[in-house]
Amino acid sequence: MLLVTNNPMVEEKINCIPKEYVEVEYGEVLQIVKQHIIENNYVLLTHPLSGSIKPNETYYKSIILDDNQRPYTDLASLELIEDAEAVYDKFMKNKMRPNWTEKVLKDFAYVDYYIMRSTFECMQMQLPL
Amino acid sequence: MKLELGKININQVVIGTESKIVDGTLHICDQDIISIVLEDDRIASCHVEIANPGDKTRITPVKDVIEPRCKVDSKGGIFPGVINKMDTVGSGRTHALKGCGIMTVGKIVGFQEGIVDMSGPGAEKTPFSKIINICLVVEPKEGLEPHSYEQAVRFAGLRVADYVGKLGHDVEPDEVMTYETKPLLEQIAEYPELPKVGYVYMLQTQGLLHDTYVYGADAKHIIPTILYPTEIMDGAILSGNCVSACDKNTTYHHLNNPVIEELYAKHGKEINFMGVIITNETVYLADKERSSDWTSKLAEYLGLDGVIITQEGFGNPDTDLIMNCKKIEQKDIKTVIVTDEYAGRDGASQSLADADKLADACVTGGNANEVIELPAMDKLIGQLDYVDVIAGGFDGSLREDGTIEVEIQAITGATNELGFNHMSAKGN
Amino acid sequence: MATFKVVHYINQFYAGIGGEEKADTKPFKEAKVIGPGMAFNKALGEDVEIVGTVVCGDSYFNENMETVLPEVLEMIRSFEPDLVIAGPAFNAGRYGMACGAVTAAVIRELDIPAVTGMYEENPGLDIYKKDAYIVPVGNSAATMRKAVPAMTKLITKLLHNEPVDPVVDGYVVRHRKNFVAEFRGARRAADMLVKKLNNEAFQTEYPMPEFDNVDPSPAIKDLSQTKIALVTSGGIVPKGNPDHIESSSASKYGKYDIDGIDTLAGTNYPDAKAYYETAHGGYDPMYANQDSNRVLPVDVLRDMEASGKIGELHRYFYSTVGNGTSVANAKKYAAAIAKELIADGVQAVILTST
């Protein structure tokens, strides 16, 4: 498995899974994940729009992928990530993210981290893929 | 399961030294309420304010709204497994205080949303401008983590609603409605000629600030299951959802679920309403597959001919909605989905994050990106400085004269996905 | 005197100036009815008069959009109209772009209604539908007699300031707008479900976007036994573009023999047997012109053919330009190409886009 994240709190606190920590913006996290799906045939394990906080509000995004080698691109994953990109573009075009205060950024980081943590609990209760 | 729901109309709420209901007036002792809230030592302070319909009052950020209810002559209590002991609810008699709500107010995280205006153009968008709100403005102890604070506020609202609801225990209701759903085989036999209809009730369960509880259980860990519709009227389902103000289902919405009411209205006439399948909206994709497999399996198992599917929230839940719809339609069970739209301010963008041609019957609660100008109010309950940073607010959207320009997604309940409101959207 | 004044925008062809050879006609106005305006003038009745016509060549408009649009608007404004009609453009791509741009700009800048007509696959439709009132019409001028009354109905309502609706008045949905319905959503959902259960007609509140998805074919088991063809919408053609494939809204595709060609050489190759380039006008052609393998990888497939990884590279590649080309034409080309490929025993195709 591989956790792609731009959330420093996830980078710091979640250590039970290999991570790719990227200091980029939300939309670029989606792009990196899409590249993994296309070039490395990785498969999405979590929904790219996790959380109902809009992509033009939160800055942070964490996505878990299955990095087992597969012979071809998983089309369902590709469709999900492309839909997520379309939603991201739509929201950013509609209205740019405000300049958040440190405190608000930390709260966004916390919510993203907590969603990942509870998702991880859900995953661990089940057989590894 | 048969429930008598006694409705006590509350026309006025007065703060005083005693708590009682006399001739439609609810008297509450704010000190009693404050001490109930402060039973939780995670909460530093609380004050109580009343907001009446028509007041020039703005309330923000609103976390949850709860209609006070109580069980009458019954061994169980309202909100089972959370406030009262675990017991199956949904039968016997329940009293509800209509026309009022307990509203929890306060910032749990810095970006929390939720505006309720009691008058003006914003009031037309939220159902909560039509009821008297007993607002609990809550402050946490310093350093409290958001998840812990959310839980403390959630429990405080429920405790107060339970306390206020019990004031109606001995009051003669203005109206009594009776709802009944029989055990499966009996229910099928009662109206064998009518199409069997169910309700697939999707609950927001993505994680922190996005949770829902069923008999106290965190719904992200459930597999879809079946409830009698009346269980929900007794508080079997509770909101722990603080985000997506316009399309979150507050506890008030759950207690007064409009789909359940409308299906009961047609029950025995046009349809045979068989029950509710609850399911979740998860982040882990394998959970989504399992949950939608199960909703379709249960719909088939119950022998349903048609279902209404409702959603909560934006984005990720669109995927669950479409998966549920597709898999149920593929079993030749007819579906109607209820959702809302994010079509951009100009209404010209793609409305949903996911779509499928099998979703050919769709009801919408409207475009949440529509912009609205909210005039200044005389009174503020809560904290306005966060309006600038709530969903749909602009940088500097709070003007000096107190006017706010926001997208209606910032207004609590504006584009509800249970079909609570009259608002819809159409091609123009 | 008529109550309402209307201005009509048309291209050089409908103004009777000429076809493609006159497409560079600069904009001009005349205070009279020209071409299809006659039919509109008659259909709209005595209350409405077309007081002026603005004409511009399609190429000139599309190539000078930024400067020509304000000019056209100014000409329209000079007639002080209550409404503007553009086209109809039918399936003419550049005319559709011009009609869409003019109607959208009139609504936005002059704050009066503007109506045009386009065939459903006209590329101008998707781009301008969010602002312009676009009435779906047939795909050629032969359907003018049907288009005029369809547009007239909407024009009349807009002139009288009556509320319009895409379903009732037959125009393309511009955008979504909130409104307050008679019943709450749950009631509407329950009513809709009952109708659906009884097999009665019902109307969804949100029609799902239409997807033209194609299920992927099953995976090829043994590539070393497979004959593969290359097809592209990236506009790769032999240098000089012998078939004159248009840089946009292509009206044809080309079929090119690559027997004995190991690479699609461009300007990066000093001594090649044959040179290639792109005819596509929708992207920077530099990289494709340096080395056309970048769009259509003949070089890699020749290597794979030599090493036995694939069975054979088909002797011909097919190419067209995907820039603004209508879906209907693209489907037509694909059907023709597929028929030939099957006849030639091709088992798999690599499609490259840009």
Image: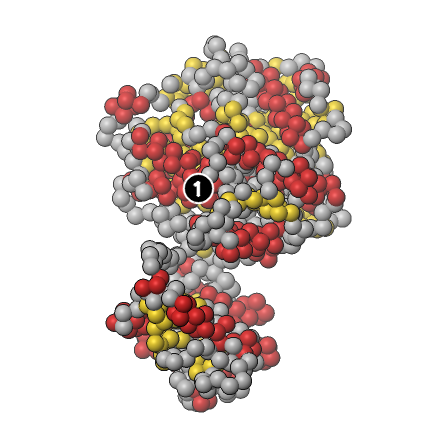
Q: Is residue B315 visible?
A: no
Above or below, comparing residue B150 to residue C34 in the picture: above
Above or below, comparing residue B342 to residue B109 in the picture: below
Circle 1: element type? helix
Q: Nearer the viewer, residue C33 or B151?
A: B151
Chain assignment, label 1: B
Q: Which residue is mark 1?
A: B321
Residue C17: percent from left, percent from top: 44, 89
At 49% from the left and 76% from the top, the residue drawn is C292
Q: Nearer the viewer, residue B204 or C115?
A: B204
Identify the image quadrant of residue B109.
top right
Left or right? Give the position of B67 relative to B329. Answer: right
At 68% from the left and 39% from the top, the residue drawn is A12
Residue B218: percent from left, percent from top: 53, 27
Above or below, comparing residue C193 to residue B230 in the picture: below
Identify the image quadrant of residue C209.
bottom left
Identify the image quadrant of residue C136.
bottom left
Which kind of residue does numbered mark 1 sit on?
Leu
At 62% from the left and 47% from the top, the residue drawn is A20
At 72% from the left and 47% from the top, the residue drawn is A100
Q: Nearer the viewer, residue B237 or A47?
A: A47
Left or right? Give the position of A49 relative to B51. Answer: left
